Amino acid sequence: MSLIVNTEEEKDLFRRAGKLAGEVHHELSKIVAPGITTWELDELAEKIIRDAGGIPTFKGYRGFPCTLCVSINEEVVHGIPSKHKVLKEGDVISLDVGATFRKESSNGKKLDYIGDTAITLPVGKVSDRVLKLIEDTKISLYAGIRAAISGATLDEIAGPIEDIAKANSYGIVREYGGHGIGYSYHEEPFILNYRTGSKTRLKPGMVIAIEPMFNLGGDRVKVKKDKWTVVTEDYKPSAHFEHSLLIMEDGAPEILTRRPGEEI
């Protein structure tokens, strides 16, 4: 089960990490355009994180080579940045970033405090259908966040996300989803984006990431030969949004990774 954060010091470390991750997205959004490489986006993300005294969460995690997961068009998640991957007019790009602040405990153990967040952006002009996919996926994230109050079940988070997908005939990625965050990147609970009958309840002090992934086609996905990049089986476009949250004693969760100027 996810770590329960009790002290203000630990809450503040999660806030710092989340704020930094949100700021990375804010800066990346300014330069996403036709002609830029995904490698350039990755370099900027790493610079922002390290200049702030943070650590890129993903770099080296289970052997992942980069700071960002950059997924384009039919790529759903875990795309690897490359100097040879150049953005084109009409692409849709998902950017997933993690920022970590590390503290050493009294017994010498290294504790990581992580902010994990994702956005999907159009590159230049895209079709109305793709724009709607992006907007609906973002709206579903906010619907899940509104449901993420202390005592809520995982199904109460997943339900409104699933309903938005079904109302718009989107595929729901079923193999991947949100998760708890503790001193390591992925912890329980695993938070799916559709109802499963789960009675697992959120508790105050939990840090979780909610991350809907909708496809313009079907549900099914597969992993490419690089053993990282997940793509839709029908090669239709996909969108992905994510925020990290701190579950509060009463009322709405605290959105740790909110981007500067983001309206929720």
Image (cartoon, helix red, strand yellow):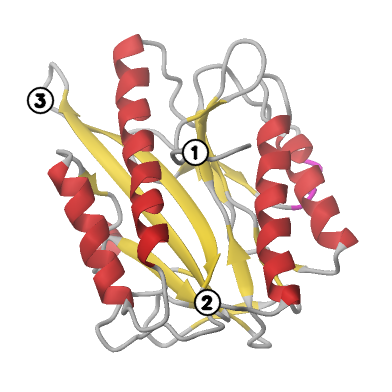
The crowd level at tag 2 (other Cα within 10 Å; few <14, some 14-19, many 20+) is some
Q: Alpha-carbon distance for marks 2 and 3?
A: 49 Å
Main secondary structure type of the part rendered in magenta: loop
* N-terminal-most mark, 2 or 3: 3
- Residue type marked 1: Gly
Give percent across and percent down for residue 60: 22, 60
* N-terminal-most mark, 3 or 1: 3
* N-terminal-most mark, 2 or 1: 2
Location of residue 40 (image quadrant): bottom left
Specify whether 186 is left or right of 108: right
The crowd level at tag 3 (other Cα within 10 Å; few <14, some 14-19, many 20+) is few
Residue 71 is tagged as none
Task: Name which residue lies at 33% across and 40% down.
Answer: 184
Which span is picked out in magenta?
A: 194-198
Looking at the image, residue 166 lies above or below residue 242: below
Q: Alpha-carbon distance for marks 2 and 1?
A: 21 Å
Looking at the image, residue 203 lies above or below residue 214: above
**From the viewer's perspective, is the residue at label 2 or at label 3 nearer?**
2
SS state under label 1:
loop
Q: Is residue 110 visible?
A: no
**Residue linked to disc 1:** 261
- Residue type marked 3: Gly
- Residue type marked 2: Gly
> Which of the image's four quarters has the C terminus?
top right
**Residue linked to disc 3:** 108
**Residue linked to disc 2:** 124
